[in-house]
Amino acid sequence: VENWLMPLKACQPPHSELHGERAVRTPFSPLGFMPVQPDPSEQQQAAASTADDSDTPNTAAAPAAAQPVQLYAGVPEGTPWCVTLVFPEVICPERFVFVLHQLGSDAWVRDHGTNFSLQLRSPCLGGLVEGVLAAEAGYEQWGLLHRLQRVVELLDNAEAAGAAGMSFVFTWLRLSSNRLLDWQRCFSYQPRDITWAQQQVAERMTEKARSSSDPAVRMYARMIMRKLSRGGGNGDEIRMGILNIMRDHGIKEGSRGGLDEPFLEQWHQKLHQATSPEDVIIAEAYLAFLHSANHDDWWRVLADNGLSKGQIESWEQPITALPMHLPQLIPPIQHYHWVLKTCHSGAELDTALTCAQGFVDPDLRWHLYDLLANRSA
């Protein structure tokens, strides 16, 4: 795991054992019982201890499926099993970071795809910022997916740092939404991965905006949400939707024969390997061209939304071909445009209202739809 450091010996609980170069395993034990034979190789429950790249090491722990009955005798049923850690004040880490490992099934348990993390003392904002800058500037494989995962991991730290921490997250994500940071660098991902990451960030940020005790944190969380995608939805529908359009209309896809339409093949590759909010813009530009048969409309819609010819041709999955005029694709592309918006454009009012209508009362719902109907008045 990136940036994990070996915990100091003084931080490691009894009976811990090394696990690789940057972690230790610690067995769970019944509360109040001492082991009969402290042999770590025979323990059936384990925890992985580690640290991140803050000023002092952080540690972590993980349980297994079966109880280590050979280490403990006479344990009453219902006795809680735990790991007790004591940190000397001078080396107390900022965070306790851990994952759980079930040895029987070899399953790793995490917190919604990220490491479990407990704040132990006030975070050092400088360490948080330096870690982000190192990733953005120096990591060979990096992009929007990694950025969102890092936001989830650091958000509690940013909240603990108050206005300074949340203003940094706001600036960081604002630079990302304005495409001033790389959205893809030597890394590809599936649509379901990015939609899941977007959903996690949106839900965690909503939680901060609603329930943080610091008014400045709530303010910055609301500001951040203006530029966040909603996430969620059906990420696999992005992957399969474009394939179904191509197959249903006899368009060549990979080795499958059919009408050769290079633009759709290039866009299909991008959608499969690096879908992003930019795909909503591409769908809108494509629809404008399909309606008019004029490539000027294609370039106009792209430019109106901040995309240039140079940008789309420079992507790792570049789009260099102009679309062919296939007006029969207008209905399926309109539906596909909606699929993309449900995942990538939660801040867009139509999408947000459609997703929220089941959670608002009828009177408010009427007023919201009236606002939509008259927004150009």
Image: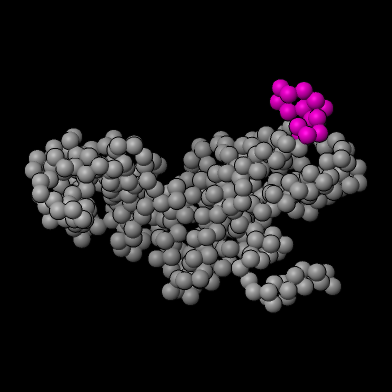
Taking the image as shown, residue 171 lies to the left or right of residue 318, namely left
Q: Which region is colored magenta? A: 246-259
Between 7 and 73, the one nearer to me in the picture? 73
Measured as percent of width and height from the top left, residue 355 is found at 65, 61
Q: Is residue 256 magenta?
A: yes
> From this viewpoint, is residue 154 visible?
yes
Q: Is residue 322 magenta?
A: no
| Quarter that holds the N terminus | top left
Residue sitting at 58 percent across and 49 percent down? 195
Q: Quadrant of residue 318?
A: top right
Taking the image as shown, residue 225 lies to the left or right of residue 280, namely left
Q: Quadrant of residue 191?
A: top right
Residue sitting at 58 percent across and 67 percent down? 223
| Quarter that holds the C terminus | bottom right
Measured as percent of width and height from the top left, residue 65 is found at 29, 43
Between 202 and 366, the one nearer to me in the picture? 366
Residue sitting at 52 percent across and 56 percent down? 201
In the rendered image, the vertical position of residue 369 relative to residue 53, given as above or below: below
Measured as percent of width and height from the top left, residue 26 is found at 22, 45
Between 145 and 113, the one nearer to me in the picture? 113
In the rendered image, the vertical position of residue 202 relative to residue 320, given as above or below: below
Q: Main secondary structure of the magenta part?
A: loop
> From this viewpoint, is residue 307 visible?
no
Q: Residue furthest left?
A: 36
Residue sitting at 40 percent across and 60 percent down? 157
Q: Residue furthest bottom?
A: 363
Colour convention of the picture:
one colour
Q: Quadrant of residue 250?
A: top right
Measured as percent of width and height from the top left, residue 319 is found at 73, 36
